[in-house]
Image (cartoon, rainbow, N blue to C red):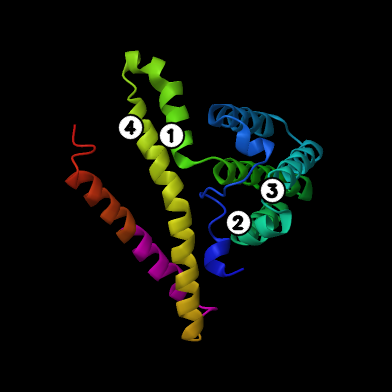
Amino acid sequence: MSQGTSALLLGSYRPGHTWLHRLPAGAKLVGLMLASVVVVALRGPGTALGALAVSVAVVASSGMGLRLTLRALRGILLVALMLAAFAAWQRNWALAVEQVADLVALVLLATVLTATTGVDAILDAITHGLRPLSRVGVNPERVALAFSLVLRAIPTTMEIAQETRAAARARGLERDPRALLTPMVIRSVAHARHTGEALHARGIGDD
């Protein structure tokens, strides 16, 4: 598995025939929202580890492959470990376990959603679900567009990070944070600016 392929799990659809692929997009969005509320509301390392176990089971039943998923999300796992070390240093290990388990559980569930649901289905579900709020000024199409941009930005940002890391490694600077962060931030901002210019050229967001 190449690095470029592994970066495509989060934010990209992977066709399949599991029960999660057949489940309507709206049901999966509502399920993810409820799961997020429950995971944040319940406190303690025990409940966090329980949520993580459920998330791992959902990944296993999605046909994505647990090993492949963990490999694709290793960048996020690295951040989670850094967060755990900081929380343990500042507070205690119980809080570190809770925060990391909650984060990884929700990332896994979000990955399952985007990997088993086409972007068009997600956008249709969001537009349909928000349509009643148009009476109070909410624009469902605009919210769906923002959601779509976020989904498309995830694999793009990860691809930029991998290309930046490869370029730094080729120059023997893989341990220099400036050689990693500076080009990545500049390219990410440039991509966001180009996206904004493309939307503006199409008259989107001018009103």
- Cβ atoms at labels 3 and 2 below 8 Å apart: no
Mark 4 nearby-residue class (10 Å; few <14, some 14–19, many ≥20): few
Instruction: Give the amino acid type for the residue marked by disc 2 in the picture.
Output: Ile
Q: Earlier in the sequence, mark 1 or mark 2?
A: 2
User: Secondary structure beneath disc 3?
Assistant: loop
* The N terminus lies in quadrant: bottom right
Residue 53 in picture, x, y percent from top left: 78, 43
Instruction: Give the amino acid type for the residue marked by disc 1 in the picture.
Output: Leu
The magenta region covers 174-189
- Cβ atoms at labels 3 and 1 below 8 Å apart: no
Question: Label 3 vs label 1: CA separation?
Answer: 23 Å
| Circle nearer the viewer, 1 or 2 | 1
> Dot 2 corresponds to which residue?
76
Q: Which mark, by number, is residue 158?
A: none
Residue 12 in picture, x, y percent from top left: 51, 50
> Dot 1 corresponds to which residue?
123
Question: Label 3 vs label 2: CA separation?
Answer: 21 Å
Taking the image as drawn, is residue 177 in sight?
no
